[in-house]
């Protein structure tokens, strides 16, 4: 293409932008704000000193209230019978690194479809990154003219070669990249929906090709096959991850003006905060908390309702490494039993939450495999995996709950003193909540790995409302135990039965009855196990260190031994044992491949 012709087009377009700005009465500063550029960048674009990005032209046309054709060509579409576009003469609507897009019918009025001639360059880095997905109204038809293209529509991926075509609803998230080592040329025909915005359609074609690394790329490792189906998901460096630094601040450094939060208060006052705003405000909050003596590992209760300052405060505490604790139960505890009860409970909460988070990692590691089963439609294979996972959950969290009930009192008394002990009824309810959380984690791992978010969207509201009502009523009658009993009852009336019902009905497509019977059997066996362990632990007396050690031995040997005797012949136990042997074998093999010096250094 003649360079002089391109430069002339650029200067003419820049002149039209400057002319429209003067007509509309906008200042350069206002236009810079409307186009998301700095004033210096806007002045360079308006002077024709640099290529105009498509996004800049699009935002200018929106600011002036005119069509993009008016800015590109200086005239509006006026052909209504037919239009011919010769080779290489399409109206260039986007030219960015790796992308060239030309409109093949820019002057045709009242179009029912938008035809584009698109060229995507091959990028080796994009082959290792997730495809960026975008949406717009209507449908889209793509036909490959040369090269190869990988297209993702929703969760499905296709490789298209010369002569291949695809038609899809473009309201479904979709994206594409060039593959095969060379650029891909294709024709995209966008059939607009009733509310389609032509500018949004054009921009979506540009965005569909874009791929960029996630800001938190160092903290997860995703492997997909050639069709884009998830194969494995791991979370390296989890111990170093800090949401405030590694997500919020990282996005602020990359896209400082990107909207992070839109807050609407009870007076309908709207406030907008960019990631740069969130980063700076959370930094100030962190400095304030630090001045108060808050440090890494401290537990802090926030009582800010949902004012926008809450989010600054919680991010600031994240930056310090402090732990924000759930305030609902604590507020009720302080109301019915006094602030001292909150301090006593916090010691129990610290121990229970540490064990819960440690055990939760077991089920977090299987979420990728579950998602892969769902993506490939292997629902028959999913049920035995779920049954085994749930079997493990009731065993692991059940024995852990028994251990907590028997070991927490002597541990708290030995560590903090007898004045920090809670009533055994309260400890029992806390352990039941811990056990229920474990069962819910097992089901939730499958539920959320399969993306079934909408089916239980109102359940959390119902559970929270019941929790508040029950906790207030029971807290007034029986004190601390009533507060936690209200939490347990709200869970039993909602999630305890609704989660498995929805999972079996919508995920496994099977009746939940047989599982409910098995569920009840697990609970009966654990109740028996707990009773035997409790009787034996009650026989132990003497110094606290001896009591703690003896009870630990009873819980480990009797608690697990009784379950082992009852379950050793079950299919779920054998499957779990085989999976555990496989993991141990892989660890041994990896250790064997390690250089000797490296093993010694560890």
Image (cartoon, rainbow, N blue to C red):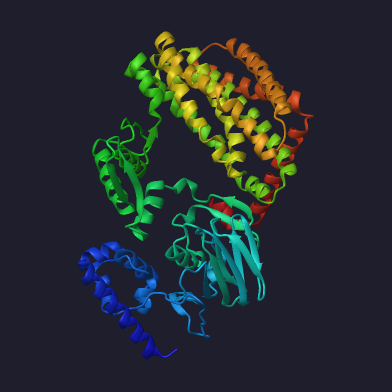
- Nearer the observer, 361 or 14: 14
- Nearer the observer, 165 or 82: 82
Q: Residue at x 31, y 32 (%)?
A: 304
Residue 129 spot, x, y in % from top left: 54, 62
Q: Residue at x 30, y 40 (%)?
A: 308
Residue 438 spot, x, y in % from top left: 58, 30
- Nearer the observer, 267 or 161: 267
Residue 583 spot, x, y in % from top left: 68, 45
Left-right relation of 581 to 27: right
In the image as oriented, which residue stretches furthest toward the front? 81
Q: In this view, does 20 lie above or below 193?
A: below
Q: In which quarter of the image is residue 315?
A: top left
Q: Quadrant of residue 530?
A: top right
Quadrant occupied by the N terminus? bottom left
Q: In this view, does 135 lie above or below 583?
A: below
Left-right relation of 601 to 507: left
Q: Is residue 534 above or below residue 2?
A: above
Q: In this view, does 28 lie above or below 357?
A: below
Residue 35 spot, x, y in % from top left: 31, 65
Left-right relation of 426 to 299: right
* Label tally: 0
User: From this viewpoint, is residue 365 visible?
Assistant: no
User: From this viewpoint, is residue 47 visible?
Assistant: yes
């Amino acid at each position: 293409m003649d360079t002089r012709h391109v430069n002339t087009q650029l200067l003419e377009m820049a002149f039209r932008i400057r002319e429209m700005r003067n007509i509309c009465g906008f200042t350069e500063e206002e236009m810079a704000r409307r186009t998301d550029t700095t004033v210096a960048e806007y002045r360079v674009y308006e002077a024709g000193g640099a290529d105009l990005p498509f996004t800049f032209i699009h935002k200018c046309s929106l600011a002036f209230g005119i069509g993009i054709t008016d800015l590109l060509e200086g005239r509006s579409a006026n052909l209504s019978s037919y239009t011919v576009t010769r080779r290489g003469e399409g109206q260039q609507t986007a030219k960015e690194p790796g992308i060239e897009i030309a409109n093949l019918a820019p002057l045709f009025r009242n179009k029912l479809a938008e035809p584009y001639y698109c060229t995507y360059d091959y990028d080796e880095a994009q082959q290792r990154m997730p495809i960026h997905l975008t949406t717009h109204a209507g449908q889209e038809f793509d036909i490959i003219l040369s090269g190869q293209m990988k297209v993702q529509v929703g969760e499905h991926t296709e490789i298209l070669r010369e002569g291949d075509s695809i038609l899809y609803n473009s309201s479904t998230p979709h994206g594409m990249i060039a593959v095969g080592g060379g650029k891909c040329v294709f024709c995209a025909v966008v059939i607009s929906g009733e509310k389609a915005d032509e500018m949004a359609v054009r921009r979506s074609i540009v965005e569909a090709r874009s791929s960029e690394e996630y800001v938190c790329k160092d903290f997860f490792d995703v492997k997909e096959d050639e069709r884009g189906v998830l194969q494995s998901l791991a979370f390296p460096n989890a111990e170093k991850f800090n949401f405030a630094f590694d997500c919020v601040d990282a996005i602020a450094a990359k896209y400082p003006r990107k909207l992070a939060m839109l807050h609407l208060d009870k007076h309908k006052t709207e406030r907008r905060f960019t990631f740069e705003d969130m980063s700076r405000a959370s930094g100030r909050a962190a400095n304030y908390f630090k001045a108060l003596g808050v440090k890494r590992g401290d537990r802090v209760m926030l009582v800010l309702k949902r004012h926008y300052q809450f989010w600054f405060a919680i991010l600031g505490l994240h930056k310090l490494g402090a732990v924000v604790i759930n305030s609902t139960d604590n507020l009720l505890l302080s109301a019915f039993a006094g602030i001292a009860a909150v301090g006593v409970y916090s010691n129990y909460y610290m121990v229970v939450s540490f064990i819960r988070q440690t055990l939760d990692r077991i089920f977090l590691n299987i979420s990728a495999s579950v998602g892969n089963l769902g993506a490939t439609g292997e629902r028959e294979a999913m049920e035995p995996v779920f049954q085994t996972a749930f079997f493990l959950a009731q065993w692991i969290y059940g024995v852990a709950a028994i251990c907590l009930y028997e070991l927490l009192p002597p541990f708290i008394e030995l560590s903090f003193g007898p004045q920090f002990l809670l009533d055994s009824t309260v400890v029992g309810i806390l352990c039941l909540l811990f056990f229920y959380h474990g069962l819910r984690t097992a089901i939730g791992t499958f539920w959320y790995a399969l993306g079934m978010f909408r089916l239980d969207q109102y359940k959390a509201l119902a559970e929270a409302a019941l929790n508040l009502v029950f906790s207030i009523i029971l807290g007034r009658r029986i004190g601390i135990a009533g507060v936690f009993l209200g939490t347990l009852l709200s869970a039993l009336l909602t999630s305890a039965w609704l989660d498995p019902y929805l999972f079996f009905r919508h995920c496994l497509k099977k009746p939940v009855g047989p599982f409910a019977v098995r569920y009840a059997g697990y609970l009966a066996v654990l109740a028996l196990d707990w009773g035997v362990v409790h009787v034996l632990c009650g026989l132990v007396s003497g110094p606290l260190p001896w009591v703690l050690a003896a009870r630990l031995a009873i819980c480990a040997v009797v608690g697990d031994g009784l379950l082992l005797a009852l379950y050793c012949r079950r299919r779920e136990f054998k499957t779990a044992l085989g999976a555990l042997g496989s993991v141990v074998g892989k660890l041994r093999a990896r250790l064997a491949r390690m250089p000797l010096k490296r093993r010694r250094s560890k």
